[in-house]
Amino acid sequence: MLENLTTIIVVAIVLGIDAFSLALGLGLNGVRRRYELKLITIIMILHIVLPLLGLSLGMAVGNFLGIWAARFGALVLFIIGLNFIYQGYKDTRTEVYPFKAGHNILSSIKPVNGENLKTLLLLGFSVSIDALTVGFSLGTFRMPIIITIAIIGIVAGFMTLLGFIGGRLFSRTVGSYAQMVGGVILLILAVKLVL
C-alpha cells in the first residue's frame, strides 16, 4: 500500500506540473485573486473527474487483459513522459524574429477575456487532459480509486496555487524545465511499473 501511495503522489505531482506552469505564466501577467480561486477550483475538479474516468476505464481493461493491461498502462505513461520532455524542451527554445516581424506578431495578439467560464474551463481542461490517460494507466495497475483521485485533485490545486505565487517571482523558463523533469519522472515510473 505504501508503494502505491508513493506512486500516486509522484504521479499527482507530475500531473500538477502543467497546472503549475499555466498558473506561473498567468501569475507573471498578474491576475486577480478571484480569477486565481476560480481557476484553482476548476483544475482541482477536472483533476478529480478525468482521472476517475480514466481509472474506471483502466480497471475495466485491466480485468479484461490481465498482465498485458499493466504493460499497456506503463507504455501509456512512458509516451506521456516523452511528450512532457519534448514539450518542455520545445518551450525552452528561444525564437528569434527580425524586429518588424516581432512587432507584427506582438501587435496581432488580441487580449483575451479570461474571466468568462468558457475560457477558464478551456484553460483548466488544457492542463487536465493528461490526467485522463494517466488515470487509465493507474487503473490498469488497480490503484485505490478514492485515495488516488483525492490526492491528484488536491495536489493539482496546490500546485496551481504555487504557480500563481511563483509567477510573481520567477520567469517563464522555470515552468518548461519543471515539465521536462516531470517527463523524466514519468519515464522512470513507467519502467518501474513494468519491472
Image (cartoon, rainbow, N blue to C red):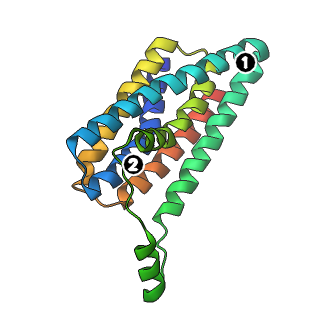
Task: Check disc 1 and give the amino acid type.
Answer: Val
Residue 98 in sight in this render: no
The earlier-in-sequence mark between 1 and 2 is 2
Residue 66, above or below 189: above
User: In the figure, is residue 23 to the left or right of 177?
Assistant: left
- Name the secondary structure under disc 2: helix
Q: Nearer the viewer, residue 175 or 31?
A: 31
Residue 14, above or below 138: below
Image spot of residue 41 (x, y percent): 34, 30
The residue positioned 46% from the left and 64% from the top of the image is 92
Q: Tell us which disc is closer to us: 1 or 2.
A: 2
- Name the secondary structure under disc 1: helix
Mark 2, residue position:
22
Task: Check disc 2 and give the amino acid type.
Answer: Leu
Mark 1, residue position:
61
Quadrant where the C terminus lies?
Answer: top right
Image spot of residue 76 (x, y percent): 66, 35
Quarter of the image where one finds residue 19: top left
The residue positioned 72% from the left and 28% from the top of the image is 71
Q: Nearer the viewer, residue 27 or 1?
A: 27
Q: Do residues under tags 1 and 2 come within 8 Å of each other at their CB atoms?
A: no
